[in-house]
Amino acid sequence: MNSDPVILISAIEHFAYCPRQCALIHCDSIWSDNPHTTHGKRAHRRVDSGQHRQERGRQVLRAIPLWSEALGLSGRADAVEIVGENIHPVEYKSGVRHGVTADLQLCAQALCLEEMLNTNISYGFIWYGGPRRRVQIDFTSTLREEVKEIVQQIREQILTAELPEAPNDKRCSQCQFLQYCLPELTSSPNRVNKYLTELVFGCDT
Ligand code: SF4
């Protein structure tokens, strides 16, 4: 029996954004909401309803469970659209695009659907609520390989249970873990002194 941990599809986006964020959520089971995530949860209500519908010639199935035995993945698609013989996963994001992080998550959903339904899926869509735009994402061989590589890295992260160093860069100001992660403090080479002087004794060095 394969004892490798099953990876949640959502972990791919977390890891692609910041490996430390992924470890906090998926190794340490920490969760924290900020205004961005709270807004995202509210905006997701319709998707989470699981109500399927017919929209402009497309059949839209919502909240569809996904898995891949080959990759050891499980999760859920916000929506799966069926147009004739073609199947496309659709992901809803309340905000704006952050590089390819969501593309990787969507591609992982496509890999699951391909295995589950024994089909080929060449593209899917991400709806961004910020600009109110639907973006087509092509599932190139490069994107597919990147997904598989990240899944492997997440699996190693879970097995070793190591918390990566904080990159402490522009990603942090948008991150819901800012107050737990303390990136400025934990990325410092003099982190113990810094902790004692700034947080415990309340003075600058
Ligand atoms: S605060 Fe920064 S380093 Fe910490 S988890 Fe978030 S993005 Fe990563």
Image (cartoon, grey):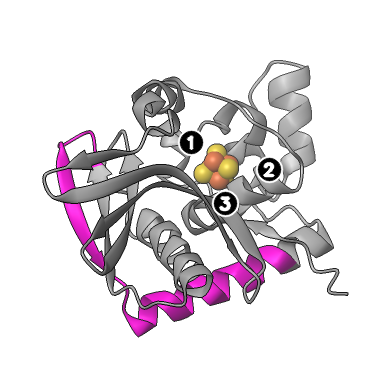
Front tag of 2 and 3? 3
**Residue 136 x, y percent position in the rendering:** 20, 60
Q: Residue at x 48, y 36 (%)?
A: 175
Q: Is mark 1 within 8 Å of ligand 1?
A: yes
Q: Amino acid at mark 2?
A: Leu
Q: Which residue is mark 2?
A: 24
Q: Which residue is mark 1?
A: 175
**Spatial separation of the CA atoms under disc 1 and disc 3:** 22 Å
Where ligand 1 lies, by quadrant? top right
Query: Along the horizontal axis of the image, is 155 left or right of 10?
Result: right
The secondary element bearing badge 1 is classed as loop
The C terminus lies in which quarter of the figure?
A: top right
**Residue 61 x, y percent position in the rendering:** 36, 45
The N terminus lies in which quarter of the figure?
A: bottom right
Q: Amino acid at mark 1?
A: Cys
The numbered mark, 1 or 3, whose residue comes first in the sequence reads 3
Q: Which residue is mark 3?
A: 75
Span of residues in magenta: 128-155
